Amino acid sequence: MSIKLVVLDMAGTTVADGGLVEQAFSRAAEQLGVEPGSEDHAKKLQYVRDTMGESKITVFRALFGDEAAAQKANVAFEAAYGELVDGGRIAPIDGAREAIEELRADGRRVVLTTGFARVTQDAILDALGWRDLVELTLCPADAGGRGRPYPDMVLAALLRTQAADDVRQIAVAGDTAYDMRSGARSGASVVAGVLTGAHDAAALRAGGATHVLGSVAELPGVLGGVG
């Protein structure tokens, strides 16, 4: 079945952020009294690593328990990440922009998604000059509030673009097991894991990857073989 809609993750898949998530988390956690270098900090940081790809507010709810603390941590995290982005600490994954342009030139619609809040997603797009690169970008709030591993953002991309007649005409690509679960749950026929981000090939396959690629730059070639 021909692929009509391609839903791509950002950080770790199309965007290289050089570990900014961990740095921003450390800043946010310190504001909530988590001592840097402590056992509590190490435990929470490992949880952040393990849940890369999941909506950040969901991660903070799991880490800090009550909603007020989670919201405070999320605001602090987004502010810290935004400052790091504004400081020029991110760049496109090699070949990512070209891959997106090739996918669009092939007649496929492309949507960028993230587990970050809208303000952070916009900061990344502005820093890279990607505002006009794709027709639609989505964060969890744009799809009802649930991020990955739920399929909501993928399905929202389909509903917003009306690019396909069947979920099997969707391809999803990401760097985490959460991306893979989201893609698999959406019914996408291609769920491609890339090895430029958080999780390794085994984790990606366990999450439901149909393909494991060195990077998103390989995706147009893979989809060319699919249709």
Image (cartoon, rainbow, N blue to C red):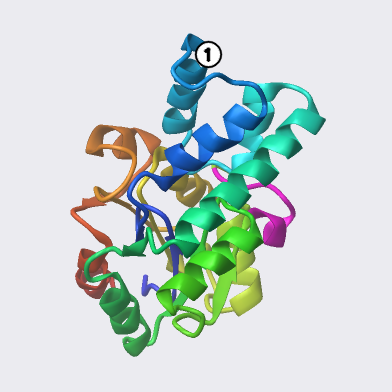
Identify the magenta region.
140-148
**Quarter of the image that includes the N terminus:** bottom left
Q: Nearer the viewer, residue 103 or 40?
A: 40
Q: Is residue 133 above or below residue 85?
A: below
- Answer left or right for 110 relative to 116: left
Percent coordinates x, y for residue 103 in the rendering = 33, 79
Nearest the eye: 171 or 51: 51
- Would residue 220 appear left or right of 33 to someone viewing this image? left
Other residues around mark 1 within 10 Å, as few (<14) / some (14–19) / many (≥20): few
Q: Is residue 61 visible?
A: yes
User: How far across and down, in percent of the image, does residue 196 sit?
Assistant: 26, 51
Label 1 sits on a secondary structure element that is: helix
Which residue is rendered at x = 40% and y = 39% of the image?
Answer: 177
Specify the quadrant of the image occupied by residue 46: top left
Pick the front one: 22 or 195: 22
Above or below: residue 46 compared with residue 10: above
Pick out the residue farthest to the right: 68
User: In the image, is residue 110 above or below residue 117?
Assistant: below
Q: Position of residue 146 (x, y in %)?
A: 68, 47
Find out whether residue 167 is within the magenta segment. no
Residue 111 shows up from this direction: no
- Give the x, y percent position of residue 163: 54, 79
The three-letter code of the residue at mark 1 reads: Asp
User: Mark 1 — residue?
Assistant: 40
Vertical relation: 224 (above or below) 36: below
Q: Residue shown at 44%/82% (left/top)?
A: 133
Q: Residue at x 69, y 45 (%)?
A: 75
